[in-house]
């Protein structure tokens, strides 16, 4: 890794000491116009989502907190280095010098790429070894970079919040791997699959940090100025709407009228977190002029579909399709991601100069260079094509990587040891804990 | 909600794709001058305070973590949508188009409005049903918008951090409701009212995130530039001073010399969090030239009064006035809010051109338009009037809403089931937990 | 404190209402060029590191969560007020008016100063009384300000992330105090020294917030523009690299192949957190053109040395040198701090105009005024000299302060009561808790 970085990676012009000259040359009058000040607060929010959000979201299992947070930490740290290289080669390799120039936007993109792999981790949580996770991440990042290159550069689809590129791909990649690694005797570790009161409270920390910072996620790499501003407003509204819908549906679906904790705030057993689905579903369209009530509508439907997914689709997946989805990523990422792709395609196709303004339309869809003459309808088509590319990459890529991971050389835990920190972690307090709970 | 948003809510000009034209028209040279970059980092901090800060601050009860964080999440998500509408109608309805134009500042204001309702929730924590909370929030937001309109627009009082508008109103609103809903037999759920070691540690997370981000709260909507800068410095100093005073008073008041956890860091039993009182008390005056030592003095007195409140006033409220204040919001919000209003009135009346500068005085108090000729003394009077308005709205509004909530149709928990997650939440780990603790 | 603030502390020009005139005078066209917008997001991240990061990092002990977070809160709040005064007197006392003018950068520096004292707290965690902590902080901040003045102003060394000024000084200061306060019978509180499952999970919160926000720490006071941008990239890469190395070394060092929780994610017993060492070691060089692969190399070596430190050096320190280092700050701060100082010296000495550009070199090392003619080689020498100053101040200062703390007037806990919250905190849930764990 060090050698590859030595050969390829350099600072970009805004993070290089020569910027003082570049700046004068470009007539930039103030240091504040460095891209750093546009992106850094969003970057830190995304960073919190990756490490605290995803990590703690998966702590709901009663005896797998270390595995959730710790392995999340490990694969994210590995993945982001590899992502800087892979994304660099595919997106920003300078043809003249053969170097990759990185800045704060590259760091955000690397975090995004890692997010795809962490989503996939959610499907196999507690059932794989750290080495398997590293292999999964290695291939996951590579597939991600290729898929992203096809969708964003070749098809020129827009996907600022990554509904397609991150969530759909990551979701199906993880589900396909989980299918290949199907364990018929997983019930042997049933005693470890529940949650306890405090593990659910820890999971709330993850949920809330993801929920709060999702507007930053969807706006982190959108256009400066009104683009970032609009993406934040849309995501904020959509998420608020999803929460209400989820609670309503969840209460209706129960005879007792109690709120089901697992479906609202935390994940527990095989259920996950519908409140976040709105953020996923608005990933593609967040920067578009979807209008505030449009964002509410997306959130409304997404809350319904995701909650229904936990009640009807997850059991179906497990029993019929033999996909064991520990964190319910199908309901939280894969399905909302597909919805997001569709919403994005429709919104793009329905864009008009009267709503966006002439220059606004060009800015939003980046109709410049080779794509100068593209119409919004064509753009909608390419968005839909991007959607399909991400599904195909997820399913096929996951099936292949799953087959590699099925080889009996990776030290995966036995069926009865799944979901148990004891296998991979040494903890002084473990024994006492066992007595207490 | 979707329909109302469809009819009324639109993007403001800085979050609209037409900004590219507006910008050129207004001679703005750089995207960084979009209001987004002035406000967004503060907005995210406030957002964390609302969802993690307020939520976890209330997790101190041993068996009510889900209720604290979960209902907080629910009413905040509902409240902010309703607040965008209500505040829009009262503050920013465009008379020509009949539309409300929203941007990042609207989102911050909606979060502020929700804060008022969450404060009120603190007084009735564990004693009401989710439906009662939604009703309380619906009326709370409405009252808030009216009261805010009277104080900020009609009286033209300044209240950037909301000592009066948010804390005083929210505090008395909650206390009045709690008075009307008085439960003489609450001791029947005594076994649920304590805290346990880990629930106190979770509450610390809430306390710390509120404490740390309070400078962002008080500066989020102050004037660009020096206004935000000054509000941060003042709040930071005031909070640091409050911590020391609280610890000192708390140690003095105990014969054993031990620190009482509940009065310093977390809330436990019927005690709450004096360390935060400084931030509340500086809400109004944060943007004024109160000077660094002025901020320390406010923090000093506030620490004394709030800590004394827990020792002497809370038992008095409960026994004599029959106000059962679960989280001690009288000491954390209502009383410090009133102090804040008084400090604001005095500081405003004492302002002078020699300290502020001619233009600085006009900027700080916004002496423009209809208020061009107002003197600082008059301003001080209007600040005090604003203070009274917020108390009246809180007490009267709370009494009325409390009467509505007393109707036996809302499914509130029985006395012996208060403070217990089991009533409204299904949790797989619950049973095991009960044995352990 | 209030009197001292009244006499000395004033708003600086960018947080004063007169800024409206200053701005016009300096030809600043936009409010966004106020230093507030350059520094505030980083400040808030640093603030979270100080209060949540350091606080929760020390919660690993099974019965000392309140002590860790609560005393951390107390001494940080006290320290930052004192630091504003001390740093003001030494660094920014205006000779004409005799006043100290503070802005957001002063707040960051005060937080940095406090960080040094919190590091020292890590060495004596659980073994001292709150009064001892306050005395330790009082002298610690004073020594810090003098040492910082010598290193940054007199020697004109660069140390943006404080490898030398903060971590080396803080580390050796704490270790020296711990040596003087050596308790031969500490094994009497052995039952309290372990961690439990949930206390380790709380410690993860601390670790992650420190890890995530470390790029903000190292970039908070570097040069506007490319300086902050570069410091973030370097720290981000270095930390990611450290995580991988730590996990690899940790796995190799164990026959069972299990990951040892304590050495990776949380601190437990006498072990601490190697994953953070990379951030410490890049403190000095973060703003230099160390290049991305250079950052990876630093992280790589730092991970090795820090992990080895836990295995070999910590037991040696305890047995032979009689230094009881509760949190292992020697491995997390002192040693990586020294490495950081050395890396900084070498990188500075190796700087060249071809890499930095003529103006870039001057900006980065601030070769202006009295230091106009300094060469990079001389600069390297002064960096190394700064390193030595910080070690000397830490060791000698710590020895003296330790002797003061040894006086039997401070109410320190008996050997058998160490690491136990019961001594200083009253907690309603304590008794129940004792039964459970």
Image (spheres, coloured by chain):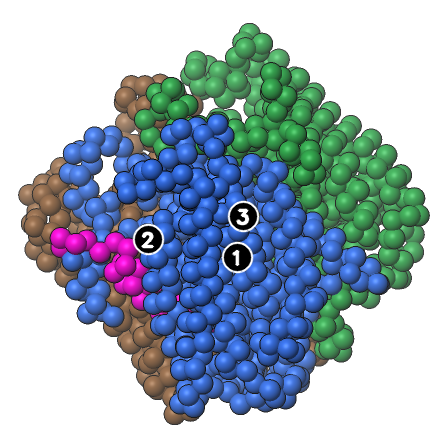
Chain colours: A blue, B green, C brown
Where disc 1 sits, the SS reads helix
Task: Look at the magenta stretch and give its main secondary structure.
Answer: helix
Same chain shared by disc 2 and disc 1: yes
Q: Report, in whole angstroms, how far the alpha carbon at label 2 lies from the one at label 1.
A: 20 Å
Q: Is residue A389 magenta?
A: no
Q: What quarter of the picture does the C terminus of chain C occupy? A: bottom right
Among the two numbered marks 3 and 1 on one chain, the one whose residue lies closer to the N terminus: 1
Q: Report, in whole angstroms, how far the alpha carbon at label 3 lies from the one at label 1.
A: 10 Å
Q: Which mark is residue A337?
A: 1
Q: Residue at x 42, y 66 (%)?
A: A393
Q: Residue at x 56, y 85 (%)?
A: A183
**Number of residues whose C-alpha sits closer than 10 Å to that of mark 1, classed few (under 14), some (14–19) or many (20 or more):** many
**Number of residues whose C-alpha sits closer than 10 Å to that of mark 2, classed few (under 14), some (14–19) or many (20 or more):** few
Among the two numbered marks 2 and 1 on one chain, the one whose residue lies closer to the N terminus: 2
Q: Residue at x 87, y 49 (%)?
A: B410
Circle 3 sits on which residue? A343
Among the two numbered marks 2 and 3 on one chain, the one whose residue lies closer to the N terminus: 2
Circle 2 sits on which residue? A154
**Residue B34 image point, x, y percent:** 42, 31
For discs 3 and 1, the disc positioned in front in the rendered view = 3
Q: Residue furthest top?
A: B373
A368 relative to C151 in the view: left or right: right
Q: Are marks 2 and 3 in contact (CB under 8 Å)?
A: no
B258 relative to A422 in the view: left or right: right
Chain for disc number 3: A
A182 versus B62 height, above or below: below
Where disc 3 sits, the SS reads helix
Between B256 and B375, the one nearer to me in the picture: B375
Q: Residue at x 51, y 42 (%)?
A: A347
Magenta extent: A68-97
Q: Residue A332 is drawn in which quadrant?
A: bottom right
Chain for disc number 2: A
């Amino acid at each position: 890794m060090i050698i590859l970085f030595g050969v390829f990676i350099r600072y970009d012009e805004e993070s290089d000491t020569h910027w003082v000259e570049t700046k004068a040359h470009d007539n930039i009058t103030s240091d504040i116009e460095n891209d750093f000040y546009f992106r850094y607060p969003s970057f830190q929010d995304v960073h919190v989502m990756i490490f605290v959000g995803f990590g703690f979201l998966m702590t709901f299992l009663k005896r797998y907190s270390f595995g959730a947070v710790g392995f999340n930490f490990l694969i994210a740290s590995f993945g982001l280095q590899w992502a800087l290289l892979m994304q660099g080669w595919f997106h920003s390799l300078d043809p003249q010098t053969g170097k990759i120039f990185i800045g704060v936007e590259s760091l955000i993109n690397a975090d995004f790429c890692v997010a795809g792999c962490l989503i996939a981790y959610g499907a196999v949580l507690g059932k794989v070894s750290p080495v398997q996770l590293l292999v999964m991440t290695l291939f996951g990042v590579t597939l991600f970079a290729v898929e992203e290159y096809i969708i964003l550069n070749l098809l020129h689809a827009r996907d600022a919040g990554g509904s397609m590129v991150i969530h759909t791909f990551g979701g199906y990649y993880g589900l396909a791997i989980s299918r290949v690694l199907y364990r018929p005797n997983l019930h042997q570790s049933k005693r470890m699959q529940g949650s306890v009161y405090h593990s659910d409270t820890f999971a709330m920390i993850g949920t809330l940090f993801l929920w709060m910072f999702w507007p930053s996620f969807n706006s982190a790499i959108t256009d400066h100025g009104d683009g970032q501003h609009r993406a934040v407003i849309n995501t904020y509204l959509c998420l608020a709407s999803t929460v209400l819908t989820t609670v309503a549906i969840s209460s209706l679906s129960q005879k007792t009228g109690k709120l089901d904790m697992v479906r609202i705030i935390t994940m527990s057993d095989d259920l996950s977190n519908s409140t976040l689905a709105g953020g996923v579903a608005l990933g593609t369209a967040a920067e578009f002029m979807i209008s505030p009530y449009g964002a509410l509508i997306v959130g409304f439907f997404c809350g319904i579909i995701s909650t229904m997914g936990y009640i009807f689709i997850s059991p179906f997946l497990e029993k019929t399709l033999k996909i064991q989805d520990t964190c319910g990523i199908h309901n939280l990422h894969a399905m909302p991601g597909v919805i997001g792709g569709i919403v994005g395609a429709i919104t793009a196709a329905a864009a008009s100069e009267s709503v966006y303004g002439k220059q606004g339309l060009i800015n939003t869809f980046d109709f410049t260079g080779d794509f100068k003459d593209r119409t919004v309808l064509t753009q909608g088509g390419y968005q839909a094509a991007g959607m399909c590319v991400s599904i195909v990459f997820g399913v096929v890529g996951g099936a292949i990587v799953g087959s590699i991971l099925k080889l009996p050389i990776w030290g995966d835990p036995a069926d009865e040891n799944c979901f148990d920190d004891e296998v991979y972690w040494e903890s002084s307090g473990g024994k006492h804990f066992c007595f207490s709970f």
